[in-house]
Image (cartoon, rainbow, N blue to C red):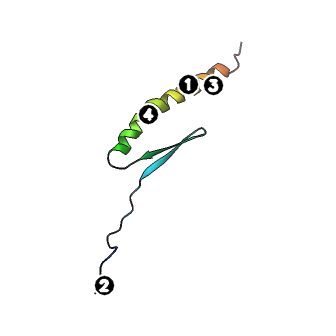
Amino acid sequence: GGGGAGGGMGVEPIGFLVTKDDQISFISTHHSKGLSAMFEKVPDLLEKYLSKKEKERKEEPVMA
């Protein structure tokens, strides 16, 4: 018979590449850390997004 070596192979993602402006971050999905690491980054990403929007708002020309 054929030895059965290598049977049952599967594909599982190891993480996600997240791009923001010129920054690239890797978020691992290994165990439960991936999801918690992603949620840990949410406040930082939100802060960056809001500060960028605030900067854009300040740079808009004021119409009189």
Specify the amino acid type for callout 1: Ser
Give me the residue at 69% from left, 16% from top: 62
Q: Quadrant of the N terminus?
A: bottom left
The mark closer to the camera, 2 or 3, is 2
> Can you tell which quarter of the image residue 38 is in?
top left
Label 1 and label 3: CA atoms lie apart by 9 Å
Residue named by callout 3: 56
Q: Percent x, y for residue 10?
A: 36, 65
Location of residue 53 in the rendering, given as x and y in whole percent from the top left corner? 58, 26
Q: Which residue is mark 4?
A: 42
> Given the image, on which type of amino acid does mark 2 rest?
Gly
Q: Is residue 44 above or below residue 27?
A: above
Give amino acid for label 4: Val
Q: Residue at x 38, y 45 (%)?
A: 34
Q: Residue at x 30, y 84 (%)?
A: 2
Give the mark nearest the N terminus, 4 or 3: 4
Q: Nearer the viewer, mark 1 or mark 3?
A: 1
Q: CA distance from mark 2 to mark 3?
A: 65 Å
Q: Earlier in the sequence, mark 2 or mark 1?
A: 2
Residue 50 position (above or below residue 34): above
Identified at 58% across, 22% down, the residue is 54
- Assign a secondary structure to mark 4: helix
- Mark 2 vs mark 4, foreground winner is 2
Q: Is residue 28 above or below residue 12?
A: above
Q: Mark 2 or mark 4: which comes first in sequence? A: 2
Residue sitting farthest toward the left: 1
How many other residues sit within 10 Å of disc 2, few (<14), some (14-19) or many (≥20)? few
Q: Looking at numbered disc 3 in the image, what kind of residue is underneath it?
A: Glu
**Badge 4 or badge 1: first in the primary sequence:** 4
Numbered label attached to residue 2 = 2
